[in-house]
């Protein structure tokens, strides 16, 4: 399995296997805490080889700098069928968030797990500005 895209964006959508991603970012500037971020999306495009046909589990966690979960992990299943081109299958995962609550400035991380194994992390920095 290869990760082609794993990003945090203002908006993302899977439209008939075509991934649309708008406004990627890794930092939010705010004047005071706690703060609610109105909306964002985690967009992921994964490529599976022919030897990886079958069921796979994914999990997405959002953690703070101390690895404390900020919200309940999002989990799901991916069913990889026979690749149409006989070589690989690409799938998109889009998870939309509304009103994410952050209590303090610092580094946060979206963590992607496939079949129980950590695959990648996305940093998100919450910076307090005057």
Image (tube, rainbow, N blue to C red):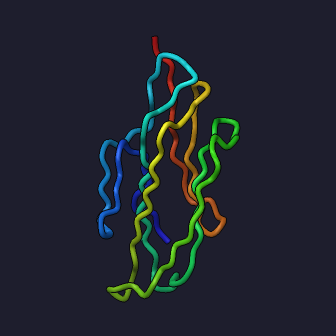
Q: Residue at x 52, y 37 (%)?
A: 100
* Quarter of the image where one finds residue 69: top right
**Residue nearest the observer in this picture, 4 or 57:** 57
Residue 82 in the image: x percent, y percent? 43, 88
Residue 86, placed above or below residue 62: below
For this view, does 83 lie left or right of residue 100? Answer: left
Residue 124, placed above or below residue 96: above
Q: Which residue lies most toward the top here?
A: 130
Q: Residue at x 41, y 70 (%)?
A: 91
Q: Residue at x 59, y 70 (%)?
A: 57
Residue 129, placed above or below residue 27: above
Q: How many marks?
A: 0
For this view, does 30 lie left or right of residue 9? Answer: right
**Residue nearest the observer in this picture, 54 or 121:** 54
Q: Residue at x 52, y 41 (%)?
A: 123
* Quarter of the image where one finds residue 63: top right
Residue 52 in the image: x percent, y percent? 52, 81
Residue 102, placed above or below residue 110: above
For this view, does 109 lie left or right of residue 81? Answer: right
Residue 126 in the image: x percent, y percent? 51, 28
Residue 64 in the image: x percent, y percent? 63, 37
**Residue nearest the observer in this picture, 127 or 78:** 78
């Amino acid at each position: 399995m290869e990760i082609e895209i794993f990003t945090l964006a203002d908006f993302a959508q899977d439209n008939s296997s075509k991934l649309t991603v708008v406004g990627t970012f890794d930092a939010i500037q705010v004047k005071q805490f706690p703060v609610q971020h109105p909306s964002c999306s985690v967009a992921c495009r994964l490529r599976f080889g022919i030897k990886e046909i079958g069921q796979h589990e994914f999990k997405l966690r959002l953690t703070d700098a101390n690895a404390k979960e900020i919200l309940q992990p999002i989990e799901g299943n991916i069913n990889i069928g026979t690749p149409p081109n006989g070589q690989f299958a690409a799938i998109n995962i889009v998870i939309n968030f509304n009103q994410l609550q952050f209590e303090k400035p610092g580094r946060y991380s979206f963590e992607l797990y496939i079949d129980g194994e950590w695959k990648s992390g996305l940093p998100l920095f919450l910076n307090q500005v005057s």
